Amino acid sequence: MMIYFATSDPAQAWDYIQKAYPGRQVDRASCAALLELVKADVVRIQDPLMHAQVGVMPGQNWSDNRRDECLAACEAIKAI
């Protein structure tokens, strides 16, 4: 059995993202698409203090047809 500490709360997800990138200036605008996916519980953001790094995992409303949208939202953060 695996236990994941991940959130579908956008405010908590934003906090996790900021903790995961302490040396970067991650602005909320670059995370907007990802946070909307979190709000809709399409994806969840893992707690970086419980995992080696921040991770994105499927939420309750995950659908394979939204995969490209999710990947694009994650790439926007990597580009910073």
Image (cartoon, rainbow, N blue to C red):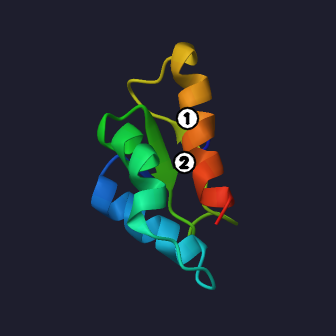
Element type where label 2 sits in the image: loop
Task: Determine contact: label 2, label 1, CB under 8 Å.
Answer: no
Describe residue 19's horizontal placement relative to residue 7 as left or right.
right
Q: How many marks?
A: 2
Mark nearest the camera among 2 and 1 is 1
64 vs 8: above or below? above
Q: Amino acid at mark 2?
A: Ile
61 on left or right of 22:
left
In the displayed structure, 54 sits above or below 49; it is: above
Q: Position of residue 10 (x, y in %)?
A: 32, 54
Is there any visible trace of residue 61 in the rendered image?
Answer: yes
Residue shown at 43% from the left, 44% from the top = 33
Q: Which mark is drawn over residue 3?
A: 2
Q: Residue at x 54, y 14 (%)?
A: 65
Residue drawn at point x = 38 percent, y = 24 percent = 61
The answer to which of 1 and 76 lies nearer the viewer is 76
The numbered mark at residue 70 is: 1
Element marked by disc 1:
helix
| Residue 72 x/y as whole percent | 60, 38
| Residue 45 image position (x, y, % from top left) | 49, 51
- What whole-number distance in Å separates the C-alpha atoms at marks 2 and 1? 22 Å
**Label 2: how many residues lie within 10 Å, few (<14), some (14-19) or many (20+)?**
few
Identify the amino acid type marked 1.
Cys
Q: Pick the residue in front: 51 or 28.
A: 28
User: Front-most of 29 and 74?
Assistant: 29
> Which quadrant of the view contains residue 78?
bottom right
Q: Earlier in the sequence, mark 2 or mark 1?
A: 2
Could you tell me which quadrant the C terminus lies in? bottom right
| Residue 5 seen by the camera | no
Measured as percent of width and height from the top left, residue 2 is found at 61, 43
